[in-house]
Amino acid sequence: MTARWLFLFLLGVAGSAVLQVHGQADSLGFISIDCGLPGKTGYIDSTTKLSYATDAGFTNTGTNHNISAEYVTPTTGKIWRSVRSFPDGLRNCYTLRSLVPGLKYLIRALFKHGNYDGRLNRWPIFDIHIGVNYWQTVNITDGDMPVIAEIITVISGDSVQVCLVNTGSGTPFISSLELRPLKNKLYPQSDMSQALVLATRANVGASANLRYPDDPHDRIWISLNVPSWMAISTTKEVQNSVIDFFEVPSTVTQTGVTSINSSTPIIFFWDVTSAKDSMPGYVFMLYMAELQHLPSNALRQFYVKLNDKPWDTKPRGLKYLETTVLYNEKPDYASQQYIFSLEATTNSTLPPILNALEIFSVVPTTGLATTTQEISAMTTIRDMYQVKKNWMGDPCAPKNFAWNGLHCGYAVSRPPTITGLNLSSSGLSGNISSSFASLKGLQYLDLSGNNLMGSIPDTLSQLSSLTLLDLTGNQLTGSIPSGLLKRTQDDSLTLRYGNNPNLCSNGNSCQPPKKKPRSMVVVHIVVPIFVVLIIVLLSILLLCMRKRRQGTTTNSVRPQNESIDNYGHTSLRLESRRFTYSELEVITNGFQRVVGRGGFGKVYDGFLEDGTQVAVKLRSESSNQGVQEFLAEAQSLAKIHHKNLVSMFGYCKEREYMALVYEYMSEGALDEHLRGKDNNTRTLSWRQRLLIALESAQGLEYLHKGCNPPLIHRDVKTSNILLNTNLEAKIADFGLLKAFNNDSDTHVSTARVVGTPGYVDPEYYATFQLTSKSDVFSFGVVLLEIVTGQPSIPNDPEPTSIIQWARQRLARGNIEAVVDIHMHGDHDVNSVWKVADTALKCTAQAPEQRPTMTDVVALLHECLELEDARNHMNARFYTAGSDTNLNNYSQYDTGMSTDVSQSRTALEAEHFDRVPRMSDGPAVR
Ligand SMILES: *[C@@H]1O[C@H](CO)[C@@H](O)[C@H](O)[C@H]1NC(C)=O
Ligand SMILES: *[C@@H]1O[C@H](CO)[C@@H](O)[C@H](O)[C@H]1NC(C)=O
Ligand SMILES: *[C@@H]1O[C@H](CO)[C@@H](O)[C@H](O)[C@H]1NC(C)=O
Ligand SMILES: *[C@@H]1O[C@H](CO)[C@@H](O)[C@H](O)[C@H]1NC(C)=O
Ligand SMILES: *[C@@H]1O[C@H](CO)[C@@H](O)[C@H](O)[C@H]1NC(C)=O
Ligand SMILES: *[C@@H]1O[C@H](CO)[C@@H](O)[C@H](O)[C@H]1NC(C)=O
């Protein structure tokens, strides 16, 4: 605070013409940038009296342009006259600094094309991102009409990037960028995990637009007038109520409209324009204040309805000169249109009133950024070597915008990590930066074919995951530092350093002190994984073709300890690779990143020598999963293989250490997607859910029918269904797998009941009869979770089984009462019914009434066909892509010019013109 006052004082002394250029924020904490303005000197805007800076210091890419003369009139504000455009690179960013972490901000980007590039009628469409999160799509449809993109969001760091993303539909550009701090209590619907994107903000019944200083938060309130509405106003101040989350200025609520008489409602509506991937949810704020002092016999009382249903529980009566705000805390999802109707009650003698309104869509802001440590290392490297690649924005996120030459690892619920850096032949010169050693997750570093000089820093040897360091073809001098030499000796690192004429010369020995000398290039021999896979496949074929008849099941699959321990003498050795513990340490970078946890222990993220990402499941000392179960899983996994079962690359059994190395399933478990534990992912669509259900059913069917002897999983649940990058489902966790005797299809176990509460077949509980129908039962629970998004034991209001929960609701014939609201009603009702019905069949009390997994697979195929038939008819809802690309619904007209009063008439006229264009603003009828 002191600093701000000091700054104010200095400003006073130096005169208001002096602007800070790099300090970014002004005394109000506002940042105002006039993009494309040449030079370094800003100016004071004549209307708002706010200081606008040039964009020097905020971005270092792009080119300045002036808009064409035909788009400039005397009332065109200065901010609109220049733009910065970004013809190069996918993503270009502005960095806004010195923010308060955890504070809420209003950030506004303004765009007026003005034919700056002289290519009339070629208007661009591009995306903007806030940090690593999608903000909105900017759709320029005309050279004159400004587009305002505004977001209200909580910023977690001390800076934020606003990025313009070229989506292949024209060059991104920007006219102005503004940031205004808000109090955190304002707009409570915006929090750490979601932001509000402005659709419209209307000052109803007003004659002019308003912003700072009328609104201390500098929101732009656009005047909205409709001929059928009667404007009313007062000169008296209108108060906000004591509990107020919006701080609407009195100047906005002093004007309003009523309908013509009390039998006519005020109606306005908002069209949802087609969305590519998902329908946005909306929040609305309706501001109403009584502006007339009413006689005692008069009554103004009205209902607010949304799409013909009461939006508000009771009829509204208003207080004189006090604003009432009606808003929804949770977003509403309507399929096409939001029609608001303010209707007077029968007792009311006066028509309803409306003073202002705001409409926002809600966007998730849960994308994870790379750690600041890695970002700053990469920034240092970029700046030091002047890397000529388009390295802008976050290095790893979002995934499809990762920097060129960078390889990142993405784990569930963890920030992405840089795992590979390839700067070969990139024109680097100078020393090897110490910042490379800050990239702790680095597995390969390729600096070959550059002009690097000086000695090799030994700090690189501390990168414990590093398996390949390529320094070939540089001008390096000195010798190989001892730490790196040691790493090459124990084979944890491949070092290539050939073609450096002055390296290891003049008595600088590059040989290890002891041990036999090695050649210049230390070759790290990697057992090719595909050979291992082929062997695994072959043995599965053998296993599944050979009919093994066993009197008891206990020893058919359950492995003998010795068979694994006697490395070199067992079939297991042929079937999968055996890792040593130290190899696992290298693969997982010292067991650094935990991607999952189970009764068994932790699961770590890792990379094989060839870069294949793997998950390493390490048994913990305290694990309640015994050695037996561990070995059972190792044995089972080595023998069975199916595209819908998680496959194993190898295992480790060394002293007390036991671990399994599986294929990496980057999207984590299904339950996280259904219940949003993983903030990185979006809600699954119905079609995605159907595919996941079908694929996991196929995996189970294979266990039951495809192998001999058949196998029962015994722990089918949503957390054991894992998803890969393409959201393909695979069944995991075979620790409880049991083979059962095919002849009687029954296995009598004397052991304790295993499985997870909420999923266990009641019949199994009662009789200890374990059959494949027990898996079918558990799978029925999985299907119900997929339909409802509820956990297997919902708390509604008491903990109950999801089966009962769903049965009760479905019995009333109301499918919508159970369907996950996150699907926003975007599904074929028949296909949902069919899945729900299948789930109920699977969870029938009597095992013989339950279908087999083969039946379930067939039923799910039919469900998918139903859903696809609908999608063919309704193609706009269906997209396989993973990018949200919401329509641009926030374009609207603003007369924000240096002189609002002069442009007022033009504005009003435009507003009348624009009323019938429903998608651009709230329409009125
Ligand atoms: C834009 O116009 C101003 C003067 O109005 C001029 O100084 C500036 O150089 C022009 N910028 C470009 C990129 O042409
Ligand atoms: C209210 O206004 C409507 C539309 O002008 C008119 O049709 C209706 O008769 C009016 N009702 C009353 C009670 O004045
Ligand atoms: C309308 O007035 C009647 C009589 O005063 C009262 O009983 C009724 O509750 C009122 N209706 C509403 C909706 O306020
Ligand atoms: C780095 O990129 C070059 C050129 O694309 C390629 O030849 C080389 O194999 C890459 N290095 C690594 C380690 O992937
Ligand atoms: C580069 O490295 C050499 C020796 O390794 C050192 O003397 C020199 O100061 C370094 N230069 C820079 C710019 O760091
Ligand atoms: C852009 O706006 C135009 C006109 O409203 C519309 O036809 C088009 O579909 C929009 N494009 C996108 C990608 O939203």
Image: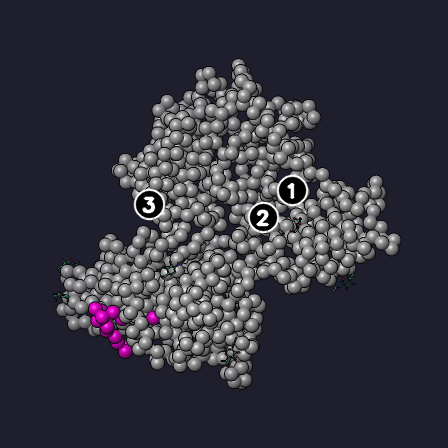
Q: Residue at x 37, y 61 (%)?
A: 889
Labels 3 and 1: the sequence-earlier one = 1
Local SS, label 1: loop
State whether label 2 is within 8 Å of ligand 4.
no
Local SS, label 2: strand
Q: CA distance from mark 3 to mark 1?
A: 45 Å
Labels 1 and 2: the sequence-earlier one = 2
Q: Give left or right: position of 156 versus 500.
A: left
Q: Which is more foreground, mark 1 or mark 2?
A: 1
**What is the x, y in percent for residue 511?**
83, 47
- Of the pair 747 and 76, the residue shown nearer to us: 76
Q: CA distance from mark 2 to mark 3?
A: 39 Å
Q: Residue at x 51, y 24 (%)?
A: 707
**What is the x, y in percent for residue 372?**
59, 58
Vertical arrangement, residue 669 with respect to residue 287, above or below: above
Magenta region includes residue 132: no
Circle 3 is placed at which residue position? 873
Residue type at tag 3: Met
Q: Residue at x 48, y 47 (%)?
A: 678
**What is the x, y in percent for residue 818?**
33, 41
Circle 1 is placed at which residue position? 610
Circle 2 is placed at which residue position? 409
Res 189 visible: no
The range drawn in magenta is 221-241
